Image (cartoon, coloured by chain):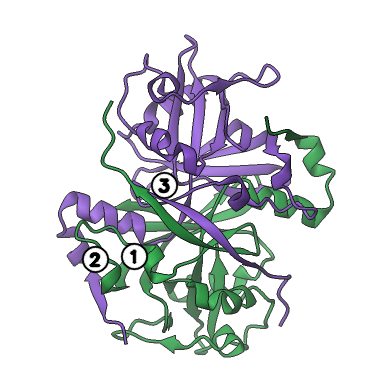
Chain colours: A purple, B green
Amino acid sequence: MTKKKYFSQKNVQDLERFTKANLINSISGFKSANLIGTKNKNGDTNLAVFNSVCHLGSAPTMIHFTLRPHTVARHTYENILENSYFTINAVTKDTIEQAHQTSAKYNAETSEFEATGLVEEYHNDFFAPYVRLSPIQLGCKYINTYEIKENGCLLVVAAIEDIYINEELIADDGFVNLDEGGIASIVGLDGYYKPEKLARFPFARP
Amino acid sequence: MTKKKYFSQKNVQDLERFTKANLINSISGFKSANLIGTKNKNGDTNLAVFNSVCHLGSAPTMIHFTLRPHTVARHTYENILENSYFTINAVTKDTIEQAHQTSAKYNAETSEFEATGLVEEYHNDFFAPYVRLSPIQLGCKYINTYEIKENGCLLVVAAIEDIYINEELIADDGFVNLDEGGIASIVGLDGYYKPEKLARFPFARP
């Protein structure tokens, strides 16, 4: 029998700051790896990696992601509030190093596109920049922010207006084979993974 | 150059219902695979798979997950509202079939533990059942629900009170090597994956 280590809430709060962050960000599982692209009114672009983008409904198509105050996400959020439009771009195994580098604290005038070598792409007059080599690109429009009053985190809710997907990844039933596109997954703040398919199951009945 | 398929919001809404659900649930990336364990006041236990559990802060340790009305998640949420306590248990590659089967619409008197063969485990008088073989078990206490008014989805926020982790998975810096525990990831509603580690990166600086 494998031995388990136990942490009470007090044990967790007594941990060194980065140890605590690594532990708590890891334990809820694998997360999505996405780059959010924005642009401010001066035309400065911004790109930032997020591990908290989740689906929130299909009709209309909505997603959410979370923000903490005083993180690199601030430029992203300010640009979204200013212009409403942003992009979500899947991170692939070939771009994990550049994706992680976008988490560095660049100033507002420095574009993470230029700093990392990821290339901007624009589709159909959409205001915000996409990441050129990303196999899944989502053009999104800001809807609302819900403040989590218990800790001040922000839940940002948005609609997906435009979807671009490498067409060979799309199965006949609409499922998208993320593994075939080399799409990555994140653990914690800095661990990058390449998931391999185990199985797809039919609709479950008792 | 890989050809991209484009979907406008109208294209998406014109898709067949399950095709639309598969597409929209896939495109935001790999998700966490967790079983939420609950118990009602009659002592009936419930277990349900979720792909939306995310971290929401470290001090205090909080997570959130989303619920749609009229899904199998209803028993889970009713039990949580009734008793406040629930567990989150990581799904492993060896339990993906049972985990998926918990998404079937069993009645409230039928325990998904019994129906799937997953074994209940209790720690230290905690009210809700854990999944015995899960390498990461989180004892959680309900905090609040935020209704997403745009589509009626519910964001459930909870505190993590107790953490049990197979100790060989925990790195010296607090990071948890989910891959070494065989922990799975989910795409969409029914795709299960086993992530392999690519890299961990140091804290990024400009």
Rendering coords of residue A118 (x, y %): 48, 26
Q: Which residue is mark 3?
A: A148
Q: Which residue is mark 1?
A: B160
Rendering coords of residue A3 (x, y %): 26, 81
Is A60 on the left-hand or right-hand side of A66?
A: right
Q: Is residue B116 above or below residue A108?
A: below
Q: Are marks 2 and 3 on the same chain?
A: yes
- The three-letter amino acid code for the residue at tag 3 is Ile
- The three-letter amino acid code for the residue at tag 2 is Gln
Separation of disc 2 and disc 3 at Cα?
20 Å
Separation of disc 3 and disc 1 at Cα?
16 Å
Rendering coords of residue B31 (x, y %): 52, 56
Q: Residues within 10 Å of mark 1 (few under 14, many from 20)?
A: many
Q: Is residue B180 above or below residue A118?
A: below
Specify which label sits upstream in the sequence, 2 or 3: 2
Separation of disc 2 and disc 1 at Cα?
7 Å
Q: Residues within 10 Å of mark 3 (few under 14, many from 20)?
A: some
Rendering coords of residue A33 (x, y %): 48, 44
Mark seen at residue A14 = none
Q: Residues within 10 Å of mark 2 (few under 14, many from 20)?
A: some
> Which chain hosts label 2?
A
Q: Are marks 3 and 1 in contact (CB under 8 Å)?
A: no
Q: Is residue B19 above or below residue B202?
A: below
Q: Which residue is mark 2?
A: A9
* Quadrant of the drawing holding the C terminus of chain A: bottom right
Is B188 on the left-hand or right-hand side of A46?
A: right
- The three-letter amino acid code for the residue at tag 1 is Ile
> Which chain hosts label 1?
B
Give the total number of marks visible in the rendering.
Answer: 3
In this rendered view, identify the residue nearer to me: B148 or B189: B189
